[in-house]
Image (cartoon, rainbow, N blue to C red):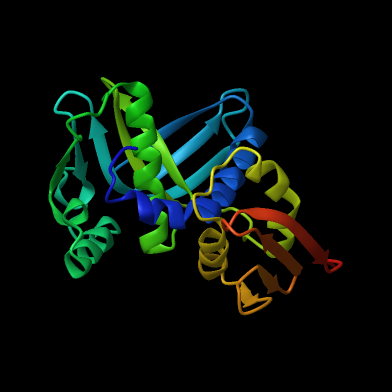
Amino acid sequence: MTFAALQPLADRAALFSALRQDSLTTALEDLGDNRWDADMAAGTLTFTSNADPSRQLVTRAHLVATIAPGPRSLLWAWAHPQGDPAGVAAQLRDYGREHGIAELSETELPFPADAAGDADWITAAAHTVGAVAVELTGRAPYYLAPVGGGTYAVFLLDAPLPPLTVAAAAIVLPRILSTVALPDARTSVWDAARLAGWNLTWTDESFSGATVADSTGTATFRFDERARITNIESSLHPQA
């Protein structure tokens, strides 16, 4: 556990976030060994192939927060010297104020007293913050950028990635679900449909299944009594 008050929001977006992170990973793997460069003035994060510098993935980057081991704190981008007070991160602040979540609306968030605060903890905390930002803004994927001294910057990216269709998700879901823990899979499926713009219908009044659909096909998720996914049945449409 990193920031307890933020975890429910991150859990809700866990499936959608994982699918979008997978899309980013695939795009970066296509570049091969690569480096990233941030241009804060231009608001871009650029990934460049080391073997062929002409091959790049250029993204619009929105700073969400920085997490630093020295002060043992998270600093939200709307209060950061290199952040935008009216930028994307302000949506998190406004949500926090509206819903009484001080961890989102306070300028700086100290690590919990019992937090290890080491590299693994900071990485986990950065993933939590990234997923929260996805949940509250609808933007994805996010990127964790090491900026020196053990500090990570969390960015939301507007990247030239293929849209997340039901067909695309159905292909990678078995692999994704083997590595991602979903504390409430039923809610995560509902939220993924919301964020991806899919249609969702429950199969019965006990919510034991959900069918998501778009122009590329359908996928039906089956859940057990603990809201865990037990099976996925997909029917995909031929694409021109």
* In this view, 76 is above or below 232: above
Front residue of 89/42: it is 89
Image coordinates of residue 100 in percent, x first then y, are 18, 64
Image coordinates of residue 39 in percent, x first then y, are 34, 40
Q: Residue at x 50, y 36 (%)?
A: 47
Decide if residue 113 is in sight here.
yes
Quadrant in which the C terminus appears: bottom right
Q: Residue at x 38, y 31 (%)?
A: 123
Decide if residue 41 is in sight here.
no
Q: Residue at x 37, y 44 (%)?
A: 128
Front residue of 51/97: it is 97
Quadrant in which the N terminus appears: top left
* In this view, 132 is above or below 138: above
Image coordinates of residue 180 in percent, x first then y, are 57, 42
* In this view, 103 is above or below 215: above
- Residue 189, located in which quarter of the rendered image? bottom right
Q: Residue at x 55, y 47 (%)?
A: 18
